[in-house]
Amino acid sequence: MPTPDIKAAIAEHLTRWGLRRFDSDAAYDQWQRTTLKPDDLAALLRLSGQRRAPGAGAAEETAFYDYAATVRILPVLYSQRYDYYMTVGSAVAERIGQARSALDVGCGIGVLTTFYARQFPQCSFVGVDRSPASIAAAQSKAAAMGLTNVRFECLDVDQSDPPKPIGPFDLIVATQAVLQTEHDPGVPSKNWQTFERAKDSSAQADFERRTGLAGRLTRLCGALAPNGRLIVCEKTGHLSRRVPFQRALAARGLALLEQPLPIQYPIIEEVTDDGPLYVLGRTGQPAVAWNESPEQADERMDLAALKNKPATPDEPLYENHTPSAQQVWTQLPERRIFQETTREEPDGRQMHIELGESQGLTYLYCANTFDQRQLVMVKSGQTPMLSRYYQELLQDLDTPG
């Protein structure tokens, strides 16, 4: 857990950047509307839409972040990431240690890079990003802070290898820069009844190709010193992305040096699960084994207590949307199935829906090959509610797209 000193230091640093923390969306929206002009908000909305549109690529991504780096936009937009900086920045800072040279990949405007440089004056930092305006903002801020142990370069790791003068590095940091897969479902499990992935080299290669992971990891490994460490934290909370990501790391000779660190932080009111954060190195004997099991997979349910719980109209007695729903479902005693459907796509993906009864309680269970699980239980008198839900789910399966 980050120390209070680190937390206090990064909070002071974020103040230097003009960033503010908000606890409510309403308060943030009010500040945004009073700080930015309507034209600014319209431009941000347009560029954000273009960035997220199907087929969008590096050009749209760069255009958005170039605009976000302008002086009037920067503090407002990046204040949304305040708790991200606090959480990830603290975790990384506590692991920099005795590194003498460090590369920060996808550094953006350099908020965290400049923090690391301030905290570790003995280490030389290089921040790279493909947004020219972001790099310019980072260079300006570093100069204003009087930092002499950090420099920033405009570099797209998707397009070019890092130039020889900036490597090799004792430490490479890549947070939300190597695997941007929020809209990629990942690699499916063997079937809807398991979280296990097959050792399918073709599926793995396809995942690395379509996400751009293969080229990025190869380039980063090329810039890492033989005894160097890689700290990486991506949006791999879902097992369907975490497993192929871990396998890609392992295939390049990278091993865990410590247990992966779960990362969770709020974006104002909405809690986000990222990560985990990995600390990796090249070692013949891994210090820590890779784990391909889901988090939150264990849970016990007291069925007797549930049966005695008063029913509330239109509300279930029990609802579970985590991987542990599978364990609870398998342990339901005297399970009797009313209806069930399993759909399989040509590519092998599966979706299972089941309506049934267990000791006088009606349940609905859903599972697919992308690790989504749902278990809902109601009193027998509320069975029609789950029957309607079952039919709605069937209709969704029959709807193209």
Image (cartoon, grey):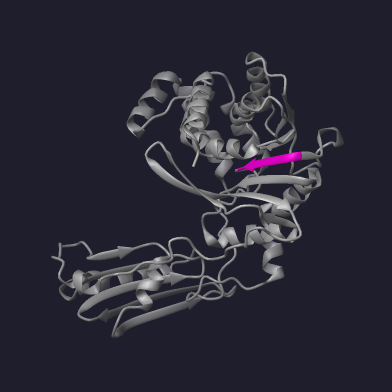
Q: Is residue 143 one of those drawn in magenta?
A: no
| Secondary structure mainly formed by the magenta segment | strand
Residue 146 location, x and y as percent?
Answer: 66, 15
Bounds of the magenta span?
170-175
Q: Tell me what residue is drawn at x 31 percent, y 73 percent.
A: 364
In the rendered structure, the answer to whether residue 123 lies left or right of residue 184 reads: right
Residue 379 location, x and y as percent?
Answer: 18, 72
- 367, 323: nearer the viewer: 323
Q: Is residue 173 one of those drawn in magenta?
A: yes
245 up-or-down from 83: above or below: below
- 235, 60: nearer the viewer: 235
Q: In which quarter of the image is residue 209?
A: bottom right
How many numbered marks does the figure carry? Answer: 0
Q: Tell me what residue is drawn at x 62 percent, y 40 percent.
A: 95
Q: Quadrant of residue 375?
A: bottom left
From this viewpoint, is residue 186 visible? no
115 up-or-down from 396: above or below: above
Q: Tell me what residue is drawn at x 65 percent, y 52 percent.
A: 257
From this viewpoint, is residue 304 visible? yes
Name the residue furthest right: 164
Residue 234 location, x and y as percent?
Answer: 59, 48
In the rendered structure, the answer to whether residue 249 lies left or right of residue 181 reads: right
